[in-house]
Image (spheres, rainbow, N blue to C red):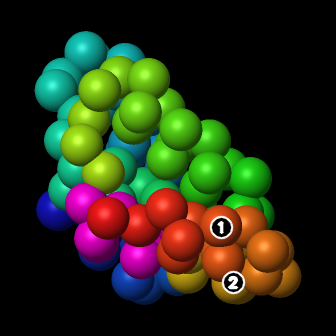
Amino acid sequence: MEINVGGKRGQWQHALQCFAEIAEKHAELDAIIYSAAISASGKSKTCQQALGLFERMRLERVERNTITYNAAIGACEKGGQWQQALELLERMP
């Protein structure tokens, strides 16, 4: 998956661009795609972008799983938002 590979190589901007292209084509976005995009957002050390994607999942009724929560928590940690990370950890199923 190109989103995940881009995020792992430190090319988080490219990974998020891939996510946007998939969403623009109205493809079905699942937890795997969202998790990869949230993880890539974390590479930018911008917790808010990751949390925006996390919230979008709820709005689009995409089930958030352990991997998704871990990606969002990691993004908050990298962005220095430890309180947000703790809140997510408490809400984790």
Residue 13 lies, in percent from the top left, at 57, 58
Going 49% across and 62% down the picture, which residue do you hit? 91
Examine the rendered structure and indicate whether residue 45 appears above or below residue 22: below
Identify the magenta region.
Answer: 65-72
Up/down of 10 relative to 71, above or below: below
Q: Nearer the viewer, residue 3 or 38?
A: 38
**Residue assigned mark 2:** 77
Task: Name which residue type carries label 1.
Answer: Glu
Mark 2: secondary structure: helix
* Nearer-the-camera pick, 28 or 88: 88
**Residue 87's mark?**
1
- Give me the disc on residue 26: none
Q: In the rendered picture of this protein, how many numbered marks are placed on residues? A: 2
Quarter the C terminus occupies:
bottom left
Left or right: 41 in relation to 4: right
Work out which quarter of the rendered image holds the N terminus and state it: bottom left
- Looking at the rendered structure, the kind of residue marked 2 is Glu
- Closest to the observer: 58 or 74? 58
